[in-house]
Image (cartoon, grey):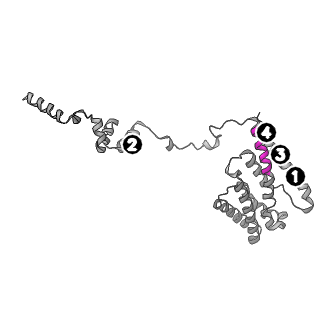
């Protein structure tokens, strides 16, 4: 009986040699369902599939880092991974801001007989954006001029319709944020232009010229100074 079984098995191996030489792993690769079962068994998750994986993760305390919430005090700390600025990175933007305000002050002296001024608070915020964070979205030329002109015009329109007061300021600020969002031109300093016009009696005579002066006109000068600051930061490091 044993001899017959051995002869039968050798006979089948002789007729079908590829079946005898096929390994379980190779056979599993020929059948997607079998390969899935073999893979699950090799990983130790033969029962329950993904549910078993989740249970094992919970059991062993494995938590994905993306699901970890940042501590509430994280935003009060400096940005991680950012290198300390060099001395030149501090000096050149500061020198650019000094030069900008000095030139604007000189222009004010020339324009004083006409009762207008170029030195307004929003341009100080523009200096910080252009000189300190030149690669930020707010420093893009499209964002800056679109927001400066649009928000200034909104301030004039709000004052013309609603007059001075809290309602005009509230409407102008809300409309300015909506305008910058719709036109994809975020530039925070421009949001102060409508409030400056509504509360500044000396600017009312400009009417819709306020959309170009002094905000947009001042930004042209600041863009020229920004190019000088960037050149100095790139070529004169210390």
SS at circle 3: helix
Bin the neighbour count of mark 3 within 10 Å (Cα to Cα): few under 14, some 14-19, many 20 and up: few
Mark 3 or mark 4, earlier in chain: 4
* Residue 235 x %, y %: 76, 37
Numbered mark located on residue 54 in the image: 2
Mark 3 or mark 2, earlier in chain: 2
Report the span colored magenta. Answer: 222-238
User: Residue at the location (31% across, 37% down)?
Assistant: 41
Numbered mark located on residue 105 in the image: 1
> Vertically, is 144 above or below 8?
below
Task: Work out which residue is located at the far top of the displayed protein and give it.
Answer: 3
Residue 24 is drawn in which quadrant?
A: top left
- Say if the magenta span includes residue 233: yes
SS at circle 4: helix
Residue 168 is drawn in which quadrant?
A: bottom right
Q: Along the line of sight, which residue is nearer the eye, 49 or 164?
A: 49
- Residue 121 visible: no
User: Residue at the location (62% across, 44% down)?
Assistant: 75
* Residue 79 x %, y %: 64, 40
Mark 2 or mark 4, earlier in chain: 2
Mark 1 or mark 4, earlier in chain: 4
Residue topped by disc 3? 98
Task: Work out which residue is located at the far right of the displayed protein and give it.
Answer: 113
Query: Does 80 sit left or right of 117 as displayed?
Result: left
How far, Cα to Cα, is label 3 from label 4? Answer: 11 Å
């Amino acid at each position: 009986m044993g001899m017959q079984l051995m002869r039968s098995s050798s006979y089948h191996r002789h007729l079908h040699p590829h079946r005898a030489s096929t390994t379980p792993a190779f056979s599993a690769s020929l059948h997607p369902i079998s390969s899935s079962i073999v893979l699950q068994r090799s990983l130790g998750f033969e029962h329950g599939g993904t549910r078993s994986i989740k249970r094992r993760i919970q059991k062993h305390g494995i938590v994905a880092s993306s699901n970890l919430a940042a501590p509430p005090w994280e935003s009060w700390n400096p940005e991680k991974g950012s290198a300390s600025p060099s001395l030149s990175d501090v000096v050149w933007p500061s020198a650019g801001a000094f030069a900008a305000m000095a030139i604007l002050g000189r222009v004010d002296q020339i324009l004083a007989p006409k009762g207008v001024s170029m030195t307004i608070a929003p341009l100080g915020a523009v200096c910080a954006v252009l000189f300190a964070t030149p690669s930020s979205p707010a420093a893009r030329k499209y964002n800056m001029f679109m927001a400066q002109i649009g928000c200034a015009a909104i301030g004039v329109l709000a004052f013309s319709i609603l007059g001075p007061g809290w309602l005009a300021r509230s409407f102008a600020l809300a409309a300015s944020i909506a305008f910058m969002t719709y036109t994809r031109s975020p530039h925070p300093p421009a949001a102060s232009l409508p409030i400056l016009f509504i509360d500044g009696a000396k600017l009312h005579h400009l009417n819709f010229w306020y959309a170009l002066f002094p905000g947009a006109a001042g930004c042209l000068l600041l863009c020229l100074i920004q190019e000088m600051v960037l050149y100095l930061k790139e070529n004169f490091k210390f």
